[in-house]
Amino acid sequence: MGIHFGVDYYPEHWPRERWETDARLMKEMGVQVVRMAEFSWFKMEPAEGEFHFEWLEEAVALLDSYGIKSILGTPTAAPPAWIIQKNPEIQPIDRQGRRRHFGGRHHDCQSNPDYRVHIRRFVTAFAKRFADNPGVIGWQIDNELGNSHGDLCMCDSCKRQFQKWLGRKYGTVEVLNEAWGTAFWSQGYNSFEQVGTPLITAVGENPSAMLDWKCYCSDLIVDFADWQAQIIRENCPSHFITHNFMCFDNKVDYYDLAGLMDFVSNDIYPAGHWQKQPHQPDNELAACHDVIRGYKKKPFWMMEQQSGMAGWEIMGRALEPGQMAAWAMQSVAHGADAVVFFRWRTCAMGTEQYWHGILGHSGNPGRIYNEAKRLTETFTKYMEEFEGSMPCPEVAIVHSFRQNYAFDIQPNHPQLRYVEQLQKYYKAFYDRKIPVDFVQDMDDLSQYKLVIAPLQYLMTPELEQHYMDYVADGGNLVLTMRTGVKDATNLCMTDRELPGRLGDLCGIEVPEYDCLLETTGGVLYGKKEYEIEKWCDIITLKGAHQIAEYSTGFYKQTPAITENKYGSGTVWYIGTEPGEELMEDIMTYITRICEIEPLGTAADGVEMMTRESEEKVWLFVINHTADEQVYHLHGMYTLLEGACEEFLQPYEVQLFEGYKRRK
Ligand code: GLA
Ligand code: ZN
């Protein structure tokens, strides 16, 4: 497409006279694309049916005259006050039954039929108006769907939709009663009409009902996006459609949402004030990019890449010199074909006054602008070559929204978080410079030498069979604690000991377990004692052999980690959450058995990642630290960018080119 760097731009926040300066400065910085208008409904339709697209057309044309293309966002995450005045019931209801009102954003119910009428009118006019505009190349639907929709919406319209959804899923209310286990606490229903949205209860909630509710909410968001995408495609068939996802966020099943998009986009704020301090660790960011690539198994765009200090009422840390560029190139290393920085100029008004951009409030180019300019000058030409290329990892980690929902509903241990657990496994590979893909459980796994499937809590006969086939055919699989505990509707399995049929695969049984509340435990592996956390499965060997044993608890000296040959493959069962050290040593052992080669060696904070085309491999070496670093590569590569091989300046990004790895 020839477009690789851009900014999120809000010309409507600034006087018309400033726009030309913005366009010139953008061009000089190497900007090729802007995203605009995703929060400008009132400006484009100040009263029902009165459309004012002229200002946006003017901005698009001006930018186009500087060679900058536009992506337009449908502004449906912030309906204007006149819509709310006409249809106040569009405003969502929270779990407490309270209405959430106008004055911020996301004050909309996505199932509300009146809201859909407003959207159809507006989006149709919007798409028609820009369908043939030479400056426009694509659309973003809504903005960060699911964001701020944590517990929303519990209104009557959502209740009716939920009932219909349940009707389609279960057919009869008797089947629902069975699937939800409503014999407990007299929760049986006579008809679907009696089922409500999960408003706050006196105490407790039904885990099966909650799982369906979360899946319904996800489906509603997907439907909302799909329906908008259809309006755009009918009126404007030649443009691409994308959406800005939020890494691992779980309000909507991103695999489903990705299906509607021409490509996936992502938003990332490593130094947001809510992140771990001083910023989200580079391994976690890397995992975010990998999961984003996994949603569509395609390269993606960064639609909001952090460019300045981020915060609303409170701010995070300032970006150190070089840090923004390192994070941007990290996105590219993991599969981004374009990087759009949020935002062009720091806003002087509204909630986001302190969410800083490429330019500060003054609008004068400064340190960040110059850094972005150097970045585009160095990398635009390579980005043209990278386009469409993909990382090709030998290791996959299984990721599932349904498992995530189930652990949100019942964490088992108060600190157990599904995504955090995935991140812990991921880090063991990232630190050892071994690239990873995220995959869905039922994906074809045969291309991977090693598959890690943590917390396979909800289980189906099909998934059991899938894992057994993968290993039987020579795959290497890691399964963990809390596997095979529940069926697909979140009821506990009762037909055999844990982990169900996967016990045959693993050569074990787990008749008992222990929850490490407010304590940690120990494991003996080799000659060393290691810390473990949260959970201990108490394992009986049924053919597997033990590779680590507990050193604490009444189950001391019983197996904690086992290994089993099955068909032509091997499966490991990890009955606990390994502390960081044990995780590292166990994964070193497992990757050695699987003959997985790291890209090189370096300290933590130095990242190595590759993208591959038909013929070429590009290797990125990124220093995420403020210190000089040394590293060593395991392959034959030619340095394309960077001062000195095997040596990195603080936050330096080096680029190498090499030949294809032989598989
Ligand atoms: C999000 C949104 C943007 C903006 C930024 C900063 O990621 O997509 O609209 O609000 O955060 O808050
Ligand atoms: Zn609603």
Image: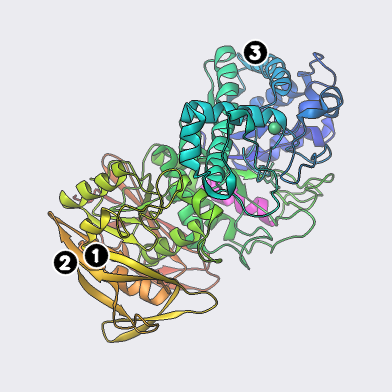
Residue occupied by mark 1: 508
Q: Where in the figure is residue 372, as x and y percent of width and height? A: 61, 50
Left of 152 or right of it: where is 188? left
Left of 161 or right of it: where is 76? right
Q: Amino acid at mark 1?
A: Ile
Q: Please tell me whether mark 3 sits on a helix, a strand or a loop.
A: helix
Task: Tell me if mark 1 has few (under 14), some (14-19) or many (20+) residues whose alpha carbon lies within 10 angstroms of its own.
Answer: many
Look at the numbered discs 1 and 2 and tell me whether their residues touch, using CB distance below 8 Å. yes
State the CA–CA distance, disc 3 to disc 2.
66 Å
Give the number of the disc on residue 543.
2
- Mark earlier in primary sequence (3, 2): 3
Q: Amino acid at mark 3?
A: Lys
Residue 248 visible? The answer is no
Q: Is residue 610 magenta?
A: no
Q: Is residue 376 magenta?
A: yes
Pointer 3 residue Cβ closer than 8 Å to ligand 1: no
> Start and end of the magenta stretch?
367-377
- Mark earlier in primary sequence (1, 2): 1
Look at the numbered discs 3 and 2 and tell me whether their residues touch, using CB distance below 8 Å. no
Residue occupied by mark 3: 128
